[in-house]
Image (cartoon, grey):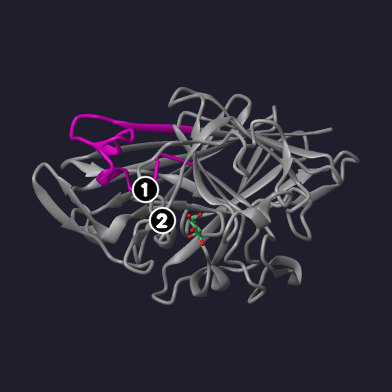
């Protein structure tokens, strides 16, 4: 196990950004930078033992600052959408930035993906980890309360990349943190042939602005049924705009299996377990070839997929969904594990 740090660049205001590299004894390497606590690269061996980078992103900081659709970043204070950027909490109406049509998306104009986090390497027996922390001030992006957030990325010799989250507040606030890597287990081309299983019997249908209607609808007999593995592209034409939906996980908020993805060509397999009750499956629909990323690769539609463990979108306005409200004196805790293997 090893941890190394290096300069990754500077923000326009001169703030230095570092990148940490975590390596294990099985040939996995995760590089995470302090800007957005962003996973910049993830090298994973294929069935022949050949390493490949399986996440989308840029080679340098510049790209992330100029134009990044949340490549690899930590998303907060609220992952996914809040309708019209408004919610009522304890009788008070709060207004957040409308940065996605009339809705609020991924924490607003300057979410947790666009701030520089403090970082501290953690060396423990059998794991290499980095502890990121950030204090989101009362009123930031319209949210109430000073929110102290800690996110730990850790890599083990079992080929597990764990992301654990903790947050504390001094005023009641919605919190819904997630990680936004675009995976492509082949490390090239599109992801339509990669086979996905989601441990979910129901999803939350959305309106034209991608806000859940509030309904929990069974996946059975629909293109959303991933209870047994299906190639991502198999039924995608039947889903208007492609997949960008929240799945209700069977594990129901207890640490359990969320999804498994297999790339038949390289043999790379990723299994995700989480304590979150939901999973946003996004099939990279908005990638349109205008971004050239690492290694000169052009990111066309479906060049990567995201599996964002989360609470359901627009929960602050949906009393029927599991609550995302964190109160003073309580601790927000969340854990997601990505386990890699080959077959
Ligand atoms: C999430 C959203 C998508 C999209 C991507 C980033 O997955 O649900 O609609 O915004 O993030 O582009």
Mark before the other along the chain sequence, 2 or 1: 2
Give 13 or 158, whichever is nearer the viewer. 158
Q: Residue at x 63, y 62 (%)?
A: 57
Q: State yes or no: residue 192 in magenta.
A: no
Quarter holding the N terminus is top right
Q: Left or right? Give the position of 209 relative to 63.
A: left
Give 307 or 11, whichever is nearer the viewer. 307
Q: Left or right? Give the position of 84 relative to 117.
A: left
- Give the CA distance from mark 2 to mark 1: 6 Å
Q: Which corner quadrant of the image does residue 200 belong to?
A: top right
Name the residue furthest front: 221
Q: Which corner quadrant of the image does residue 297 belong to?
A: bottom right
Q: What residue would you read off at disc 1?
A: 213
> Which stretch did the figure color magenta?
309-335
Instruction: Give percent across and percent down for residue 235.
Output: 69, 49
Question: Which circle marks residue 207 in the picture?
Answer: 2
| Secondary structure category for the residue under label 1 | loop
Instruction: Give percent across and percent down for residue 39.
Output: 57, 52
């Amino acid at each position: 196990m090893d941890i190394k740090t290096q300069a990754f660049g500077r923000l326009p205001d001169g703030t230095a950004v570092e990148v940490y590299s975590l390596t294990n004894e099985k040939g996995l390497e995760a590089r995470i930078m302090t800007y957005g606590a962003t996973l910049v690269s993830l090298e994973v061996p294929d069935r022949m033992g050949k390493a490949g980078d399986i996440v989308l992103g840029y080679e340098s900081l510049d790209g992330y600052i100029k134009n990044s659709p949340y490549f690899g970043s930590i998303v907060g204070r609220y992952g996914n959408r809040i309708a019209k950027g408004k919610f009522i909490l304890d009788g008070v109406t709060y207004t957040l930035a409308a940065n996605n049509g009339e809705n609020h998306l991924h924490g607003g104009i300057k979410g947790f993906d666009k701030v520089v986090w403090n970082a501290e390497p953690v060396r423990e027996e059998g794991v290499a980890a980095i502890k990121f922390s950030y204090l989101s001030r009362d009123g930031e992006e319209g949210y109430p309360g000073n929110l102290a957030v800690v996110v730990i990325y850790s890599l083990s010799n079992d080929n597990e990349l764990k992301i654990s989250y903790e947050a504390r507040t001094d005023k009641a606030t919605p919190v819904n943190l997630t990680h936004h890597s675009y995976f492509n287990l082949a490390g090239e081309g599109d992801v339509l042939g990669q086979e996905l299983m989601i441990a979910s019997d129901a999803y939350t249908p959305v309106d034209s602005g991608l806000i859940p209607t509030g309904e929990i609808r069974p996946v059975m007999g629909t293109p959303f049924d991933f209870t047994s593995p299906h190639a991502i592209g198999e039924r995608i034409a039947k889903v208007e705009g492609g997949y960008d939906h929240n799945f209700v996980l069977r594990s129901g908020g207890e640490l359990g299996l969320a999804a498994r993805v297999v790339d038949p060509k390289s043999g790379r397999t990723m299994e995700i377990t989480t304590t979150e009750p939901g999973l946003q499956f996004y099939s990279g629909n908005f990638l349109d070839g205008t971004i050239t990323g690492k290694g000169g690769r052009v990111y066309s539609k479906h060049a990567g997929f995201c599996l964002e463990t989360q609470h359901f979108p627009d929960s602050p306005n949906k009393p029927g969904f599991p609550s995302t409200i964190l109160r003073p004196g309580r601790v927000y805790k969340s854990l997601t594990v990505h386990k890699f293997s080959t077959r």
